Image: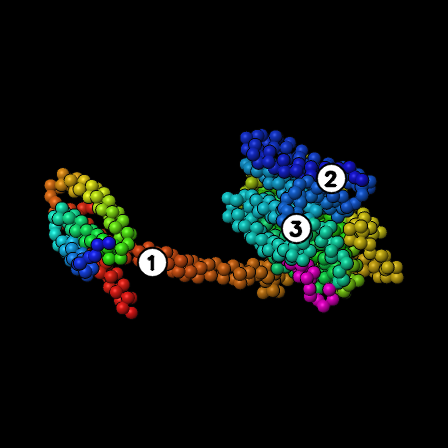
Amino acid sequence: MVQSYVPLSYYLLLSGFLFACGVVGFLIKRNIITIFMSIELMLNGVNLSFVAFAAHWHALAGQVFVFFVMVVAAAEAAVGLAIIIAVYRTRETLNVDQVNLLKL
Amino acid sequence: MNSSLNLWLIPILPLAGAAINGFLGKKSSRQAVTTVALFFSGAAFAMALWVALRFSSLTLPYHEYLAHWIRSGSFSADFAFYLDQLSLVMLLVVTGVGFLIHIYSVGYMWDDPSYYRFFSYLNLFMFFMLTLVLANNYLVMFIGWEGVGLASYLLIGFWFTKDSAASAGKKAFIVNRIGDFGFLIALFLLIRHFGSLTFDQVFQSITPMSPETAGTGLLTAIGILLMVGACGKSAQIPLYIWLPDAMEGPTPVSALIHAATMVTAGVYMVARSHVIFERAPTALTVVAIIGTLTAFFAATIGIAQTDIKKVLAYSTVSQLGYMFVACGVGAFSAGIFHLMTHAFFKGLLFLAAGSVIHAVGGEQDMRKMGGLKSFIPWTFLTMGIATLAIAGIPPLAGFWSKDEILWKAYQVSWVYWLIGLITAFITSFYMFRLLYMTFFGDYHGVQVDTHGHGHDAHGHGEPHESPMVMLVPLMILAALSLVGGLVGIGDRFEHFLAPVFGATDAVEGASHGTEVLLMGVSVAVALSGWWLAYLLYYKRPELPQKIADALGGFYQTVVHKYYVDEIYAAVFVKPLIDGSTRILWQDVDRKIIDAAVNDAGDGARHVSDEARHMQSGNIRSYAGWIAAGSAVVIAFMIWMGVR
């Protein structure tokens, strides 16, 4: 096992920072693509803490979880992008404040 | 071993008649309806006669099992019939008198537009009554019991477009229901304690029990509750009020249901349950007291009535009182004997009254009759016989049975005897009053056609005799009233019923003189009642009015039937209606139940009205809510961790 020279707390801080960035972006941005990317950022922030813990504790479960998260994220991206395209075709905007009729 | 008698045919025949007339009668001719109705009721009578003829060769009691009905645990009730001397007497009375009344009704109801409906109901009534008397357990008896209640409701309210008839039917039904409630509870007690309702089994378990001496106990409770049921059906105090109102029905109905058969169901039931009553002296005393009071009370009301049918109605109530006195002093066979003779002469009285009403074009007020004996001699003759019979003039039917009851009552307590005797005097008085007012003096009914008494008010000037089809039943019943009492001579009737009620040993050898003396007294009393009526309503017809004026308030009280209906209305009906309207409807239903439902709906709407603002459709506000929610959850978890 290769000794890790970066302490766990650094990873966790980075992970928390990435997650916080995602949350803030999710809350303040109006462009739906940006919001979508913020979500991906939050997922990856969490992924980072998973792999960091996995490496620290020498446990495989964290790594496996990351794969699951990535699969879900990929699926979500496919569906989400499809929806975004559909919205854009009818509304001709990606501003979420103008997409509030709860229908296409 | 008995070969099957096929007893089930006896009730089923009238039922078939009722069904055929009820379903097909509307489209058939009157002749066809008549044929069906008379055939099926006559066939039932013929069956009953056939059974009676084979009676001596039967081993009694005879059981006939038809089908399972209820099987529940150890309890079972079957459709099964039972024949002994008592049911046979009832069977013959119901089918015989019933058949005669069917014949009579052909003439009486001929012009009624609902002719078929009348006969359908009449047959239906016979079916239920026969079920009642042939039942081998209390439950089947109860079917008949409720059924005759239904049939009487239908028949009393037969002219249902008339308000008074409709409400009289309702009254009969509701008042009967009160009695039925007592009957039902008695049945529940029987099931609870004896696990059966079959006569044989119940009586077998009761027979070894000794009489309840402390005055209370299970059998006393059952007995009194059964008596409550009998009070309803047989129109005894305090539930007699429906019977006089029931005179709203067509007259043959009054004769069939409210004189000859249905009201006797209570007497029959008490007599059938004699095993219970004999072991419950308190219950017997209750029966005797109710009977005595009713007999006397109803008779006094009868004095002041002017409606010919109302007089007979109260007389029926009064005579039923006699039957209960008989049962109450343990002389069940005397009660049944009176039931039988009463069926003859009271059926006759009602039918003759119907013939009178028919003759004067629907008038029922005796003050507007008078002098009818020359117009309708046959009716007069038969009604005269019935009056003599009910008044207790020997050797007619009523004398034997009434005297038997008075004699048995005397042996128990002279109080019953005395009140019974006074009642006999009053009975004789009001019956001859009826006879004199109707048939003697001058005819007062000039305006026969102006009175809308409904169906048979076909215009005619003079009273006219009824057709043969009505007169023949009158004559047959008159013959029975003449000789019907003779079967009781020398206690033959009692001996006939002895296997049912147990033999009462003829111990009164020494008191035979007393019996003859009492007999003389009651004849004297009956004759003096006759004489008084003769004096007041024939010789000095102006006197009654003077007496009435002199009595003033008391007379008015009697005319208004002691205001019993008004008292019941004030004590029971009005509080019920007011309580239902004000408390149950306006308070409980509208202010509590409705309010709860409405408020729940309103509340949900208000809350939703507020809450729906959250559902803005704005994605960023959702995001804000999610973030805030997550923050709360995280804060909570941190707090939990710190703690």
Residue under the image location 71 percent in, 67 percent down:
B215
The local secondary structure at tag 2 comes to: helix
Q: Which label is found at residue B48?
A: 2
Q: How is the image coloured?
A: rainbow
- Residue extent of the magenta highlight: B212-228
- Residue type, label 1: Asp
Give the quadrant of the N terminus of chain B: top right
Whether residue B508 appears in this view of the structure is yes
Distance Cα–Cα, label 3 vs label 2:
31 Å
Decide if residue B361 is on the left or right side of residue B6: left
Mark 3 surroundings: few (<14), some (14-19) or many (≥20) residues within 10 A: some
In this orientation, which residue lies closer to the viewer: B5 or B286? Answer: B5
Tag 1 and tag 2 share a subunit? yes
User: Relative to B148, is B527 above or below?
Assistant: below
Whether residue B396 appears in this view of the structure is no
Which label's residue is closer to the chain start, 1 or 2?
2
Q: Position of residue A95 (x, y in %)?
A: 12, 47
Decide if residue A8 is on the left or right side of residue B285: left
Q: Which label is found at residue B599?
A: 1
Q: Which label is found at residue A36?
A: none
In the picture of the structure, the residue carrying the numbered disc 3 is: B75
- Residue type, label 2: Ala
Which label's residue is closer to the chain start, 3 or 1?
3
Tag 3 and tag 1 share a subunit? yes
- CB contact under 8 Å: marks 1 and 2: no
The local secondary structure at tag 1 comes to: helix
Q: Nearer the viewer, mark 3 or mark 1?
A: 3
Q: How many marks?
A: 3
Assess whether residue B217 is covered by the magenta stretch. yes
The local secondary structure at tag 3 comes to: strand
Magenta stretch mostly in which secondary structure?
helix
